[in-house]
Amino acid sequence: MSRWYEQHGYVIVARNWRCKRGELDVVACKDGVLVVCEVKARASNAFGTPAEAVTPAKQLKVRRATADFRASLRASNDPLLSLVKSVRFDVACVLGTQLEMLVDIF
């Protein structure tokens, strides 16, 4: 997933960032947009698609972890925070060896 973002001109800000309220798989930035990507992988669709695993409860958890991430930027006076104008949530769906990027999905 990181490679996909880099190929599209994004700067990777964090990978597997953890806090009490959850984990952010990939955080990237481009043109003032902070992108938080949830990665879901499945070997097959036998138990549902990767996208179906990103339930409303999981979305809320990611949003809360993102708030903690931004708070950590504020606390450390990180200059990245001044560049961020908006936040976008993507989902990277990996099914076997196929990658599907769902951009601005929640």
Image: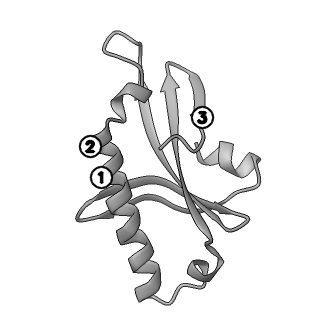
* Disc 2 secondary structure class: helix
The residue drawn where x is 70% and y is 57% is 10
**Mark 2 touching mark 1, by CB under 8 A?**
yes
Are circles 3 and 1 on residues that touch, CB within 8 Å? no
Q: Amino acid at mark 2?
A: Ala
> Measured along the vertical axis of the image, is residue 31 above or below residue 7?
below
Q: Which mark is residue 92?
A: none
Residue at horizontal 40%, vertical 12%? 45
Q: Residues within 10 Å of mark 2 (few under 14, many from 20)?
A: few
Q: Residue furthest top?
A: 46
Q: Residue at x 43, y 28 (%)?
A: 51
Q: Which residue is mark 1?
A: 61
The image shows residue 9 at horizontal and vertical percentages of: 76, 54
Relative horizontal placement of residue 7, taking residue 28 as reference (left or right): right
Where residue 85 sits, quadrant-wise, is bottom right
Nearer-the-camera pick, 106 or 26: 106
Q: Residue at x 56, y 21 (%)?
A: 97
> Upstream in the sequence, badge 3 or badge 1?
1
Q: Which residue is mark 2?
A: 57
Q: Which residue is mark 3?
A: 101
* Circle 1 crowding by C-alpha within 10 Å: few under 14, some 14–19, many from 20: some
**Nearer to us: label 3 or label 2:** 2
Q: How far is mark 3 from mark 1, CA to CA?
A: 20 Å
Rendered image quadrant of residue 17: bottom left
Q: Amino acid at mark 1?
A: Lys
Amino acid found under the numbered disc labelled 3: Met
Residue 100 vs 21, above or below: the answer is: above
**Residue 60, percent across and down?**
31, 51
